[in-house]
């Protein structure tokens, strides 16, 4: 597990902590014994992943990871770090849509 959050993860955490979206989120949550979710809404079984530049190199690995999580009953939403910084309202619209649609 990483020792600290990225700046964009910190930004997102400040906006979703404390039931600000109506659900409880936890951060840096181990799942399935081999993955760490950036953020998890346990009651909704929703994983939020913040994708920075590093993830462009990992698209296949991320797709396999997402598929494993989905097979286990989790929904995964990936939010681009640049979107969080450049248009946070649109990023939250993406998260809200994932929260309130199944």
Image (cartoon, rainbow, N blue to C red):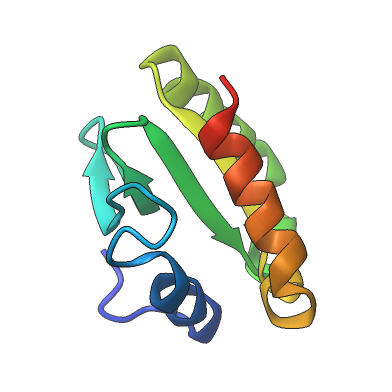
Q: Is residue 3 left or right of residue 71?
A: left
Percent x, y of residue 23: 33, 47
- 87 and 23: which one is in front? 23
Q: Position of residue 56 (x, y in %)?
A: 74, 58
The image shows residue 65 at horizontal and vertical percentages of: 50, 33
In percent of the image, x 41 and y 25: which residue is there? 74
Q: Name the residue: 44% across, 55% down.
A: 21
Residue 61 seen from this side: no
| Position of residue 11 measured from the top left corner of the image (x, y, whole percent) | 50, 81
| Image quadrant in which the N terminus is located | bottom left
Considering every residue shown, the one lying at the far bottom of the view is 7
Report the quarter where the C terminus lies.
Answer: top right
**Residue at image point 27% right, 37% down:** 42
Up/down of 72 relative to 90, above or below: above
Using the rendered image of the protein, determine whether residue 46 is visible from the camera's viewpoint. yes
Task: Tell me the residue at 59%/36% (across/down).
Answer: 98
Residue 26 lies left or right of residue 80; in this view the side is: left
Q: Quadrant of residue 87 in the image?
A: bottom right
């Amino acid at each position: 597990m990483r020792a600290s959050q990225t700046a964009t993860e910190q930004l997102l955490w400040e906006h979703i902590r404390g039931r600000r979206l109506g659900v409880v989120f936890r951060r840096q949550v181990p799942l399935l014994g081999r993955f760490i979710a950036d953020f998890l809404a346990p009651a909704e079984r929703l994983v939020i992943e913040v994708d920075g530049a590093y993830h462009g190199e990992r698209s296949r690995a991320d797709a396999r990871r997402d598929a494993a999580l989905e097979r286990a009953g989790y929904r995964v939403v990936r939010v681009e770090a640049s979107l969080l910084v450049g248009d946070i309202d649109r990023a939250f619209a993406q998260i809200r849509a994932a929260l309130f649609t199944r």
